[in-house]
Image: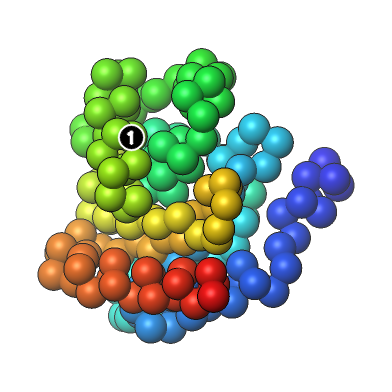
C-alpha cells in the first residue's frame, strides 16, 4: 500500500495543471493517469464557482468506462490493454447514461481517438458533465479534465475545450 501511495504523490507539474485549469475555468479539475494497469485520479483542484463538482479523491479507480478521463485513457492505449482493462473491470452502470456494452464503448473510443476529446455526459453522475484531453507528449498516459454542472458545461463546452488545450499546449512547449 505504501508503494501505491508513493506513486500517487505527483510532482508539482500535475498539481500545476489542475490548479491552472481550476483557476481559469472556475470548475473542478483533475488529472487521471495509468498506474500499474489501473486508471487513477492523480491530482485534483476544486473549482471556485458557487456550485461545483466535488473533488475526485486521489487514488480513485474504477468506472473508467463512465468517466471522461477513463474513456480518453482507454482510447489512447493499445487495443490489448483496453480489452484487458475491460475484462478486469465490468462495465456496470452508474447512471442511465453509462455505456455498458463493448459495442457502445468501441464506438465511443473511436470518436475520442478522432477528436482527442472525451466527454462524460452524466455517465458517472447525474447533473454533472466532464471533459478530458490528453496531457503530455509521447504515449498518452495522462489526461487533464474538468467537471461541471451539466447546464454550465453545455453553455461553456467550447470555451472549456479551448482553455484546456491552451494549458496542454504550454505543457508540450
From the viewer's perspective, tell me whether residue 107 is left or right of residue 86. Answer: left
The residue under label 1 is 109
- Measured as percent of width and height from the top left, residue 83 is found at 49, 19
Q: Quadrant of residue 35?
A: top right
Q: Is residue 72 above or below residue 148?
A: above
How many dots with numbers? Answer: 1
Dot 1: element: helix
From the viewer's perspective, tell me whether residue 52 is left or right of residue 83. Answer: left
Residue nearest the viewer, comparing 96 with 105? 105
- Measured as percent of width and height from the top left, residue 128 is found at 28, 55
- Measured as percent of width and height from the top left, residue 171 is found at 54, 72
Q: Residue at left 45%, top 55%?
A: 134
Circle 1 residues within 10 Å: few <14, some 14–19, many ≥20: many
- Measured as percent of width and height from the top left, residue 33 is found at 58, 49
Q: Is residue 49 above or below residue 15?
A: below
**Which quarter of the rendering shows the C terminus?**
bottom right
Amino acid at each position: 500500500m505504501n508503494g501505491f501511495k508513493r506513486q500517487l504523490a505527483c510532482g508539482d507539474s500535475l498539481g500545476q495543471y489542475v490548479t491552472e485549469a481550476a483557476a481559469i475555468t472556475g470548475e473542478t479539475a483533475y488529472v487521471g493517469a495509468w498506474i500499474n494497469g489501473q486508471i487513477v485520479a492523480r491530482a485534483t483542484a476544486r473549482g471556485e464557482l458557487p456550485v461545483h463538482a466535488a473533488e475526485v479523491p486521489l487514488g480513485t479507480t474504477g468506472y473508467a468506462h463512465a468517466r471522461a478521463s477513463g474513456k480518453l485513457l482507454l482510447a489512447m492505449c493499445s487495443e490489448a490493454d483496453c480489452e484487458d482493462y475491460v475484462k478486469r473491470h465490468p462495465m456496470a452502470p452508474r447512471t442511465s447514461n453509462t455505456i455498458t456494452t463493448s459495442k457502445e464503448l468501441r464506438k465511443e473510443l473511436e470518436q475520442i481517438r478522432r477528436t482527442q476529446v472525451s466527454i462524460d455526459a452524466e455517465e458517472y453522475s447525474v447533473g454533472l458533465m466532464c471533459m478530458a484531453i490528453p496531457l503530455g507528449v509521447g504515449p498518452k498516459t495522462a489526461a487533464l479534465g474538468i467537471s461541471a454542472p451539466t447546464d454550465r458545461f453545455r453553455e461553456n463546452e467550447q470555451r472549456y475545450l479551448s482553455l484546456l488545450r491552451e494549458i496542454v499546449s504550454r505543457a508540450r512547449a
